[in-house]
Image (cartoon, rainbow, N blue to C red):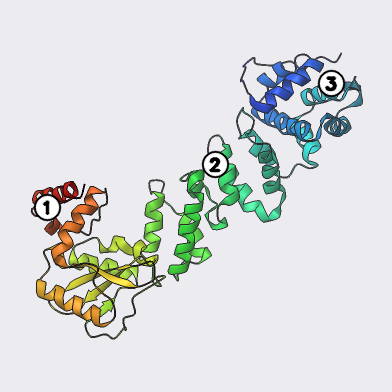
Amino acid sequence: MTPLPAIKALKLRPFGGAALSIAVDLDAHRPGFVSYVLCASPLKRQAIFAALTVVEQEGGELLAARLSVAAPARCILSSHPKTMIAQALTLLRARKIVQAVFGEVPPGLLGMLSGLGDSPLPQQRFYHDIFDMFSNPAHRQRASALLQITGQIGPSYIEITRHLDPILIHRNILNRISLAQVDDVNTVLALIRSTVTTATDAALRQSIEQIDPKTRLETFFARWLKKMDRPMAAPDILADDPDLAVLTTGEAMVSLGRRFQNCLGSKAPFVATGRHAYVYWRHSPEAIAELHRLSNGQFVLADVHPVLNQRPDPATVAAVRNKLQSLGIPALETIDNELRGCAVLRLTGAFDIMIGPRFFEDIDEQLNELEREFSNAA
């Protein structure tokens, strides 16, 4: 019997799952096989794990035939498929095993396998997904990004790389997101492309490559949305209206937010998605009308913000409301009910930083009144 290769450094690293079950079965035909796998290098282990998926999916005969072609005849001393597999997997180098499993060894695949660590991938298809990414020229960018990941390449990285928009396939993005965020990240990118005319693939790619290590992904996307210049929806107000000016660019929102000393500039995502719109009141005292878009597409007046979020001038509020009403944009609620509405939102955990100090006046009295109303209703 051909002896198993000597183990240079005995350092057992356990593994489990379907791979262990198949390995134990092979060990029954070739004692010592499991011990060998337990001490093998990460690359050799992953090559073996990839081979074991063939055993589970297609049976031992097919893999035995493939491995027998790669292994020297003098080393294969048994005709039993499982014995042949165990012998070949211990004697062959990782490259030969991978070639027997997939038919070829595309550049970078061995480096990818060595970065997977000691455990088998949780799903068999992952090994075929990896091979497809490295063998298909259309996925070369995805394969290259996987090799750029520092540390162990977990299975979540494989899934993220498969489903993420190609523009986002870069270590600066991969190191910042989880698998659960992939769909949302793709959606945000689609939003940026739809609402920012300067968001070309080249510009996006360059900015991704230049992300500072300390920059959060939310900050990166927010900076792009501040360049928004074509929101998905806006109220039907003429550009030359003598009283009102619709803010349709992130630049205009940031500029006016500085003048009013509020966080209007941070509201660009709401405007980009068409959920909110902000309209500048051109007359003195200046004000910003906040409009919300209903499910039927109609905008309604939700609030009026003066400079520094102070209490709005009643005459200004009335003028803004009447003007918008004349354009077919009704008010969601009156200022008299504004405080109560805000208190209700706070009791539900909602918060909007645009709501200024005026809403905190007599808040205890208003909350007590709201509590009494709820008690009476019960």
**Residue 145 image offset from top left, x and y in percent:** 58, 47
Q: Are marks 2 and 3 in contact (CB under 8 Å)?
A: no
Query: Which mark is in front, 1 or 3?
Result: 1
Q: Which residue occupies the foreground of this view, 228 or 283?
A: 283
Query: Which mark is in front, 2 or 3?
Result: 3
Q: Secondary structure at mark 3?
A: helix
The disc placed on residue 254 is none
Identify the amino acid type marked 1: Gln
The disc placed on residue 83 is 3
Residue 275 appearing in the image: yes
Q: Secondary structure at mark 2?
A: loop
Residue 209 appearing in the image: no
Horizontal relation, residue 328 to residue 145: left or right = left
Write down the residue under mark 2: 149
Residue pictured at 69% horizontal, 27% vertical = 19
| Count of labels in the image | 3
Q: Earlier in the sequence, mark 1 or mark 2?
A: 2
Crowding at dot 2, Cα within 10 Å, few <14 / some 14-19 / many 20+, comes out as some
Q: Could you tell me how far apart the alpha carbons at marks 1 and 3 are, in whole angstroms?
A: 81 Å
Q: Could you tell me how far apart the alpha carbons at marks 2 and 3 are, in whole angstroms?
A: 37 Å
**Residue 37 image offset from top left, x and y in percent:** 70, 21
Write down the residue under mark 1: 366
